[in-house]
Image (cartoon, rainbow, N blue to C red):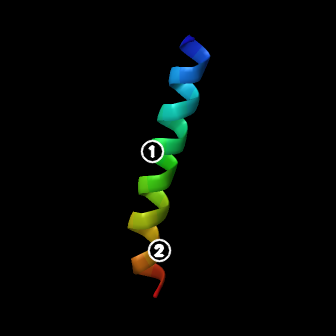
């Protein structure tokens, strides 16, 4: 269960990082 939480947090953080960095590249 704890691994699932870490997995979800990793996806959540990674998703926001990608969406924050992408506009800066254009």
Q: CA distance from mark 1 to mark 2?
A: 14 Å
Can you give x and y, in whole percent of width and height, for residue 14 in the image?
A: 51, 49
Residue behind mark 1: 13
Q: Residue at x 47, y 74 (%)?
A: 22
Looking at this rendering, what residue extends furthest in the bottom direction? 26
For residue 1, which numbered disc appears in the image?
Answer: none
Tally of marks: 2
Q: Quadrant of the N terminus?
A: top right
Q: Quadrant of residue 7?
A: top right
Q: Residues within 10 Å of mark 1 (few under 14, many from 20)?
A: few
**What element does badge 1 sit on?**
helix
**Sequence-earlier tag: 1 or 2:** 1
Can you give x and y, in whole percent of width and height, for residue 6 in the image?
A: 54, 25
**What element does badge 2 sit on?**
helix
Describe residue 24's horizontal placement relative to residue 1 as left or right: left
Q: Residue at x 45, y 44 (%)?
A: 13
Residue behind mark 2: 22
Q: Is residue 2 above or below residue 5?
A: above
Describe residue 4's horizontal placement relative to residue 24 as left or right: right
Nearer to the camera, 15 or 26: 15
**CB of mark 1 within 8 Å of CB of mark 2?**
no
Q: Residues within 10 Å of mark 2 (few under 14, many from 20)?
A: few
Can you give x and y, in whole percent of width and height, for residue 20 in the image?
A: 39, 65
Q: Is residue 18 above or below residue 26?
A: above
Q: Is residue 18 above or below residue 15?
A: below
Can you give x and y, in whole percent of width and height, for residue 5 in the image?
A: 51, 22
Q: Residue at x 49, y 62 (%)?
A: 18
Q: Residue at x 40, y 78 (%)?
A: 23
């Amino acid at each position: 269960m704890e691994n699932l939480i870490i997995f979800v947090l990793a996806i959540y953080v990674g998703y926001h990082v990608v969406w924050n960095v992408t506009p800066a590249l254009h």
